[in-house]
Image (cartoon, rainbow, N blue to C red):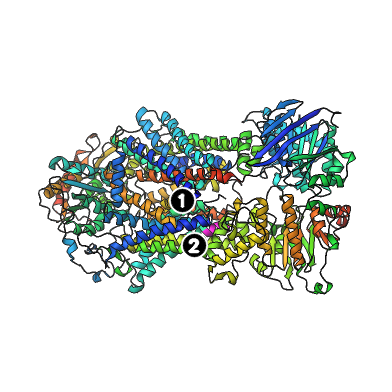
């Protein structure tokens, strides 16, 4: 039997980091900001969570710190992409370089110094235990989806965000400080990226390695498009993606298709996303002002 | 994304492109200066003898005077040791860290100094990094992985006074010493332990990248398990990424969900994810790789198969320091105590005595060559 | 009316500078309760700048704004709105992907609730009452992007009217409306004025100003040059005030050359330069027209964008095509420039139908002055030389194989810069650095340099100042005198009337509603543009 | 002050601030900034051999930098040069180890196959963009991940070395290798520098001529500057987009082939240290201009070649990534200051 409780909780856990980031990115792109640097912001959060968890023994303080680290990284993005109006794709790429480099330097300095030999306190499971367990971040990630949906489609703030990403001039005329709103949303997305990183480092892996994010930040970007810039859609896409991952684990674990080289399995989620994008197409659906700078009149 | 990129302006461009081509030209002439003797092949054969490329027979081993030259004159007195590892010597608690510890051990015993290690260089960078280490006067350089064999074989002839040691290497030369860990014996024993301890009859091996050393270790593990319990089912899986702990954890969880109850990892960093998946799950067991990993999932850690890299490094290092390096490959197996299986010393309640006795007997048989192992 | 009713909003000695350019120069302006003030002026006279200052979008460089005789300072459009100043924009500030109700909520007063509230019912209730009073039916849940332009404007008006709005500013509201929609808008405006709101009505159309307003203020080059009670005014006075008695444009207004200029000899009629036969374009095809993004105002209104359009233009003729925006002009221009393949029908140049692509049309002798200078006319970051090279880069004269002869191209560009008097930079200057008028000169230089057989000019003077307009008109006349067949597609009726040689076609709902002489009466044009003549046969969607 | 001089000064100023930040970071990590700088310089330029290494690292960066610049000039964000490079490397190895290819055609065919494979990989993104409207940023990123797994598969199955033991390919045949450039004087060590460096320079020259002087290059730049105007001028926009992707991918693929034919001769897992990503920095620093890409690739090549030296000075190699990021941020900041400088805002006009 392929589908059982563990497969389900595993899928939920695997979807958590991507979902947290993608939920944020839905808001980011809805307000008109495309951030390729999500992956880097996740790495920031992942390392910060481990360091703080080791230092304080409190995984919840660690979560807070991870979110803070994500916000800080996003502030650099906002400064260059929104305040200085530089190209968002290029600033995002730069954020990735910066994050990989800085966390690398920090991590090594940390391990050579006070961090060696200590272990982080893992985020406890709230429901169940071990492989069948669900931790606070997973609950948060999935609880955020209806909240995000409500915020985006049933509040005035959400309305303003959607208008800003479509016709920033209209939002501006309605009294929105477009660039300030974009910056705030960018910081919020950064916070969620930090949590997404923490979901990996103290949620699942309970430690940090360089490259721990394994491209999940980029996957989140695809998930947003696939989910049609909608939190519920993004959740569906994130679950699909996670399910493909877990299916891949399960197939390998149960010797199904044995003999197929494992890189084939590993490529499945990416190919799947590409095929999905190709089939659904993305023409004309993205927020009209996505990636453009706004000059306040 | 309609963002104006930097736009061309003709006048400035003309001015600047002239400048640039000036620079380009000087680069070109600079490199031309190096060309004068244009040879099809480096002065020495960079071919490792055992990867016969098509057309390899055409290759001439050209004993040019270059290869015999010592360069540069080495500083006398200071014995420097270099190290190249595929992973971080800090965070990878097994493979790369062991190499680091090994060099530290040589340093402690011989009074040498250690150059900070070069970690995870890309394929195109290995040779350059290696040459730099040699030029900087490192007389002994450890390359910790079979993937460095070709680079060492290419560089070694240019530095006859430097000794290159390649873990798992295949090429032998006067100053090129492969260390061959015969880990098969130890993983065979590990397989026996797993095959005995399993209640469900399903055990598993989790690897990251499917490289030969890992693959053979799993094959011998399987053979060991089958030796004690022919019906046991051994699952071998790979996650593809030795950095992605989360993936290894989830992969292991998938195995456990399917009834596997003993997992041997050989996935470097990502092995931590395997331990975490097992920790807290009753009646399942973890087995470490390469080093004593009894600090991972301690309560459910049966033991680890161990490559005693530090001792092997020390043996070679001492010989080289004493000027006795002979370029013969160093074999490191059960007989030399360079590999062995070690039970988890912090936790002894589970392993029955009969199993320990059986292992002692098996070890004797393996050393005596009575057990066919994959190499 | 001043003195009769209380002044609500006033500007005193308002000056606004942009860099070294003075857009407004010590302007005085006032609007009273229930008063309709028309603000008249040519493009670039400063009308929009003044309104942006009054509605809080721009801060004045100097001078004060008074409300109820007390000085005020608007921090933002929202601040101005909360004090009762509403604005109906020419280019609607509506979000096409939001429903009408959502658009209304977006701009509703913040007092209706916090950021997390969603008082769409309350907003809708108010709007429904207002709409009921104005006699409008509005599909509240439809996406605004799917609505006809006239309805979109009503949504924009509802947005601007927030309960206590005391002054409502309309920025060229009739530019996008059909002549039939215009009277309805005027009725709305009068009703709003009857309710005691002050109305500012911006326009450059004399008849509208005379029909609607109580008082007229005329701006020219940033200064108020004329103020007067409407009942004492006529078109002649206003036209002179607007353009100045001495300018070329005034001459045009007073004596449209029209039929009096030399028409092509009848013998040439046999060789029509351009022959358009039964061209039909469906709306589905229209959406494929090009990469340019359609704005909020160009929602598809009609099942067919062009319906069996047939006409022919002779060498030496300027053939005018009039009509309200959105009646098929865009599609017609695309078909005539080879950018769009019609569903049926043919376009022949000198008796031959070229393959449908822009390069083939250009080689066949068609030159295009497109409507959108920045999106279609020019590749903005490229240099002047490169932009004019776009007209000839594929001609064998300027390349050897795949390699372009830049020296020759630059020499040619240099000659064109001199001939067309392009100022603000040399051939190696990016066209981004040029002023709007000079950018248009680049477009015209490229179009006219090769002595084209057919010229398609679409709104060629939109957004230009008076001098530049006269320049463009002269250039087109000269091209006509040199024997080109010119198709002038314009929404400016006065431009069409003054330039067209013998005939003007009026487009309505994708059909040619009629072809008349340029000096036909304004009523005739108004009727045709409103589709009156075709009312029985066409079911307007 | 003439504008180019002022722009250059602005950039230098921003870079200086960036260098200061990096120095602070290095000092914060407990190492001496001066020692690190010295080690970096020595590693990159300290000897003829080291300079050779710098040029070796710069070679693929010139090619991938050109790939990125070509696409950016058409306003396409091809950030998939990494994947295209891997595909190029795989194709080169496939041809180079094949016995059915005649020896004297091997090198040329290797390079052509590499370029072709890179172009084909980029072509997927081009088709997705043109026919399905999928943003190329997304598709090229995803294709990078697929390429990494494809390589992992290739070195384990179809391209694995003859004995099927190591996770790498066979070495390509000698005739398929690029000529090594070695010094004549005997007291100097051999460098690994190969003729690929000339190929990279030739490619830069080719791209420069192409963009500046040819009809195709003019079309490419015009589509980038304004698709609407290009369309009106009769330039087929979609076709130009596809061609640009193909050219961009071919350049990146060629970079992979040059690495195989000139440096490694075989393929292994984790083949590229991120040349395709660094290429974005290379292109941006060079303002997408082919000539400057040579300079900027040399700069980043020197950083990479010198990074081993940095490590031995007590700071980890990852510092190089921080340096790349800081250089990029400095360039971005300088770009902002340039736009803000008074001579550029003089023509503000009324709305």
Chain under callout 2: D
Give the magenta part as a residue range: D126-131
Quarter of image, res C454:
bottom right
Q: Residues within 10 Å of mark 1 (few under 14, many from 20)?
A: many
Chain under callout 1: D
Q: Residue at x 77, y 33 (%)?
A: C167
How far apart are the alpha carbons under marks 2 and 1?
A: 20 Å
Find out whether the residues at labels 2 and 1 contact each other: C-beta distance under 8 Å.
no
Residue B118: percent from left, percent from top: 27, 47
Residue C285: percent from left, percent from top: 69, 59
Please give the residue where the numbered disc 2 appears in the rendered image: D246
Label 2 and label 1 in one chain: yes
Which type of secondary structure does the marked residue at label 1 adopt? helix
Q: Is residue C175 left or right of residue D322?
A: right
Please give the residue where the numbered disc 1 appears in the rendered image: D284
Q: Residue at x 32, y 61 (%)?
A: B31
- Overall secondary structure of the magenta stretch? helix
Please name whichever residue, C9 or B128, is drawn nearer the observer in this view of the structure. Answer: C9
Q: Residues within 10 Å of mark 2 (few under 14, many from 20)?
A: many
- Taking the magenta stretch, the answer to whether it contains residue D238 is no
Residue A74 in view, yes or no: yes
Quarter of image, res D167:
bottom left
Q: Earlier in the sequence, mark 2 or mark 1?
A: 2
Which type of secondary structure does the marked residue at label 2 adopt? helix
Mark 2 or mark 1, which is nearer to you?
Answer: 1
Q: Is residue B301 above or below residue B167?
A: above
Please name whichever residue, A171 or D9, is drawn nearer the observer in this view of the structure. Answer: D9
Residue D85 in view, yes or no: no
- Taking the magenta stretch, the answer to whether it contains residue D128 is yes
Quadrant of the snapshot with the N terminus of chain C: top right
Residue A253: percent from left, percent from top: 38, 49
């Amino acid at each position: 039997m392929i589908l059982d409780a563990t497969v389900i909780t595993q899928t939920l856990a695997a979807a958590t980091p991507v979902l947290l980031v993608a939920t944020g990115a839905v808001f980011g792109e809805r307000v008109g900001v495309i951030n390729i640097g999500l992956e880097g912001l996740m790495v920031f959060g992942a390392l910060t969570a481990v360091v703080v968890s080791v230092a304080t023994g409190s995984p919840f303080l660690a979560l807070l710190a991870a979110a803070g680290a994500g916000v800080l990284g996003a502030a650099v993005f906002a400064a260059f992409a929104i305040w200085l109006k530089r190209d968002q794709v290029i600033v995002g790429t730069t954020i990735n370089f910066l994050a990989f480099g800085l966390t690398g330097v920090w991590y090594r300095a940390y391990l050579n110094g006070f961090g060696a030999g200590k272990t982080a306190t893992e985020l406890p499971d709230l429901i169940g235990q071990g492989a069948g367990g669900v931790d606070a971040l997973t609950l948060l990630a999935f609880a955020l989806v209806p909240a995000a949906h409500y915020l985006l489609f049933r509040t005035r703030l959400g309305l303003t965000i959607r208008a800003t990403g479509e016709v920033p001039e209209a939002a501006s005329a309605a009294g929105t400080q477009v660039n300030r709103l974009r910056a705030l949303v960018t910081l919020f997305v950064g916070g969620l990226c930090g949590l997404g990183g923490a979901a990996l480092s103290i949620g699942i892996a309970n430690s940090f390695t360089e490259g721990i994010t394994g491209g999940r930040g980029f996957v989140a970007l695809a998930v947003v498009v696939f989910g049609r810039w909608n939190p519920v859609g993004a959740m569906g896409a994130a679950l699909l993606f996670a399910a493909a991952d877990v299916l891949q684990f399960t197939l390998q674990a149960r010797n199904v298709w044995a003999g197929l080289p494992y890189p084939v399995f590993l490529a499945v989620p990416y190919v799947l996303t590409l095929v999905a994008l190709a089939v659904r197409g993305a023409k004309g659906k993205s927020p009209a002002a996505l990636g453009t700078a706004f000059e306040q009149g | 994304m309609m963002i104006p990129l930097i736009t061309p302006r003709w006048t400035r461009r003309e001015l600047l492109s002239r400048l640039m081509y000036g620079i380009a030209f000087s680069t070109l002439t600079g490199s031309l200066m190096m060309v004068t003797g244009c040879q099809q092949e480096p002065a020495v054969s960079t071919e490792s003898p055992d990867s016969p490329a098509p057309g390899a027979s055409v290759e001439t081993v050209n004993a040019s005077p270059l290869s015999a030259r010592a360069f540069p004159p080495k500083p006398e007195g200071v014995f420097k040791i270099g190290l190249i590892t595929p992973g971080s010597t800090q965070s990878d608690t097994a493979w790369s860290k062991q190499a680091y510890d090994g060099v530290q051990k040589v340093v402690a015993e011989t009074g040498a100094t250690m150059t900070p290690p070069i970690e995870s260089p890309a394929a195109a960078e290995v040779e350059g990094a290696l040459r730099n280490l040699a030029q900087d006067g490192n007389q002994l350089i450890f390359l910790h992985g079979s993937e460095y064999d070709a680079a060492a074989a290419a560089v070694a002839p240019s530095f006859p006074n430097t000794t290159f040691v390649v873990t798992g290497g295949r090429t032998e030369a006067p100053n090129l010493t492969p260390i061959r860990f015969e880990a098969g014996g130890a993983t065979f024993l590990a397989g026996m332990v797993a095959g005995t301890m399993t209640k469900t009859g399903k055990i598993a091996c989790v690897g990251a990248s499917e490289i030969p050393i890992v693959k053979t270790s799993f094959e011998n593990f399987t053979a060991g398990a089958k030796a004690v319990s022919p019906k046991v089912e051994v699952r071998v899986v790979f996650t593809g990424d030795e950095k992605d702990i989360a993936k290894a954890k989830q992969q292991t969880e998938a195995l456990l969900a399917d009834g596997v109850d003993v997992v041997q990892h050989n996935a470097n960093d990502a092995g931590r994810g395997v331990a975490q998946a097992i920790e807290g799950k009753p009646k399942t067991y973890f087995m470490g790789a390469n080093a004593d990993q009894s600090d991972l999932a301690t309560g459910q850690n049966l033991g680890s198969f161990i490559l005693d890299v530090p001792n092997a490094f020390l043996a070679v290092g001492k010989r080289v320091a004493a000027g006795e390096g002979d370029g013969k490959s160093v074999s490191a197996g059960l007989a030399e105590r360079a590999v062995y299986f070690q039970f988890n010393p912090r936790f002894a309640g589970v392993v029955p005595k009969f199993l320990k006795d059986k292992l002692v007997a098996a070890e004797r048989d393996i050393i005596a060559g009575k057990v066919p192992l994959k190499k | 009316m001043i003195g009769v009713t209380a002044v609500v909003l006033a500007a005193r000695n308002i000056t606004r500078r942009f860099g070294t350019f003075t857009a407004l120069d010590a302007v005085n302006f006032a609007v009273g309760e229930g008063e309709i003030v028309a603000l008249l002026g040519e493009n670039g006279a400063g009308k929009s700048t003044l309104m942006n200052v009054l509605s809080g979008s721009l801060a004045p460089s100097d001078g004060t704004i008074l409300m109820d005789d007390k000085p005020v300072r608007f921090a933002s459009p929202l601040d101005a709105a909360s004090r009762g100043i509403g604005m109906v924009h020419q280019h609607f500030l509506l979000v096409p992907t939001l429903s009408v109700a959502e658009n209304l909520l977006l701009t509703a007063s913040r007092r209706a609730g916090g950021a997390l509230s969603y008082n769409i019912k309350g907003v809708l209730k108010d709007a429904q009452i207002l709409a009921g009073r104005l006699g409008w039916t509005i599909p509240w849940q439809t996406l605004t992007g799917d609505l006809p332009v006239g309805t979109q404007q009503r949504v924009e008006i509802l947005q601007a009217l927030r309960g206590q709005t005391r002054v409502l500013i309309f920025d060229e509201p009739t530019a996008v409306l059909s002549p039939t929609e215009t009277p309805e808008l005027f009725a709305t405006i009068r009703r709003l004025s009857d309710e005691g709101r002050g109305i500012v009505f911006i326009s450059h159309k004399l008849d509208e100003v005379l029909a609607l307003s109580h008082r007229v203020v005329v701006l020219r080059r940033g200064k108020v040059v004329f103020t007067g009670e409407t009942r004492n005014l006529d078109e002649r006075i206003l036209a002179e005030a607007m353009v100045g008695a001495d300018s070329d444009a005034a001459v045009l207004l007073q004596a449209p050359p029209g039929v009096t200029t030399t028409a092509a000899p009848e013998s040439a009629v046999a060789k029509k330069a351009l022959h358009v036969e039964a061209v039909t374009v469906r709306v589905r095809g229209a959406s494929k027209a090009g990469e340019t993004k359609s704005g909020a105002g160009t929602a598809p209104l009609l099942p067919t964008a062009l319906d069996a359009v047939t006409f022919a233009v002779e060498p030496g003729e300027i053939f005018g095509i009039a009509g309200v925006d959105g009646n098929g002009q865009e599609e017609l221009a695309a078909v005539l420039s080879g950018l769009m393949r019609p569903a049926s029908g043919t376009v022949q140049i000198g008796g031959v139908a070229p393959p449908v692509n822009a390069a083939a049309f250009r080689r066949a002798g068609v030159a295009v002055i497109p409507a959108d200078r920045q999106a279609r006319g020019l590749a903005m970051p490229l240099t002047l030389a490169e932009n004019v090279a776009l007209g000839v880069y594929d001609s064998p004269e300027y390349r050897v194989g795949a390699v372009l002869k830049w020296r020759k191209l630059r020499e040619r560009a240099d000659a064109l810069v001199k001939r067309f008097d392009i100022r603000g930079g040399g051939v190696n200057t990016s066209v981004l650095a040029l002023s709007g008028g000079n950018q248009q000169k680049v477009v015209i230089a490229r179009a006219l340099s090769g002595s084209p057989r057919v010229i398609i000019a679409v709104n060629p003077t939109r957004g230009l100042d008076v001098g530049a307009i006269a320049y463009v008109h002269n250039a087109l006349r000269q091209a006509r005198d040199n024997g080109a067949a010119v198709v002038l597609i314009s929404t400016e009726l006065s431009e069409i009337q003054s330039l067209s040689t013998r005939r003007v076609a009026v487009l309505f709902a994708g059909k040619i509603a009629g072809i008349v002489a340029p000096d036909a009466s304004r009523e005739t044009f108004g009727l045709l543009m409103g589709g009156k003549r075709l009312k029985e046969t066409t079911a307007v969607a | 002050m003439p504008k180019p001089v002022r722009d250059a000064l602005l950039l230098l100023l921003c870079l200086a601030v960036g260098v200061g930040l990096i120095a602070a970071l290095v000092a914060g990590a407990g190492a001496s900034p001066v020692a690190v700088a010295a080690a970096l310089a020595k590693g990159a330029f300290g000897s003829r051999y080291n300079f050779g290494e710098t040029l070796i690292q710069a070679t693929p960066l010139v090619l991938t930098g050109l790939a990125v610049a070509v696409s950016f000039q058409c306003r396409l964000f091809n950030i998939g040069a990494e994947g295209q490079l891997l595909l190029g490397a795989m194709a080169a190895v496939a041809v180079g180890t094949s016995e059915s290819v005649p020896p004297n055609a091997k090198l040329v065919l290797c390079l052509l196959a590499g370029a072709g494979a890179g172009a084909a990989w980029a072509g997927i993104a081009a088709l997705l963009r043109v026919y399905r409207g999928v943003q190329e940023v997304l598709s090229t990123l995803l294709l990078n991940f697929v390429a990494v797994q494809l390589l992992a598969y290739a070195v384990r199955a179809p391209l694995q070395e003859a004995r099927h033991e190591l996770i790498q390919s066979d070495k390509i045949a000698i005739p398929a290798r690029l000529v090594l450039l070695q010094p004549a004087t005997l007291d100097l060590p051999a460098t690994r520098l190969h003729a690929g460096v000339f190929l990279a320079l030739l490619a830069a020259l080719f791209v420069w001529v192409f963009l500046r002087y040819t009809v195709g290059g003019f079309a490419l730049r015009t589509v980038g500057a304004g698709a609407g105007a290009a369309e009106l001028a009769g330039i087929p926009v979609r076709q130009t987009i596809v061609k640009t992707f193909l050219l961009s991918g071919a350049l990146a693929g060629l970079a992979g082939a040059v690495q195989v034919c000139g440096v490694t001769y075989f393929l292994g897992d984790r083949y590229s240290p991120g040349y395709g990503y660094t290429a974005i920095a290379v292109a941006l620093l060079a303002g997408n201009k082919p000539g400057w890409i040579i300079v900027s690739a040399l700069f980043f090549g020197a950083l990479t070649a010198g990074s081993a030296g940095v490590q031995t000075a007590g700071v980890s190699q990852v510092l190089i990534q921080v340096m790349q990021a800081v250089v990029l941020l400095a360039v971005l900041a300088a770009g902002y200051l340039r736009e803000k400088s008074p001579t550029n805002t003089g023509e503000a006009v009324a709305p």
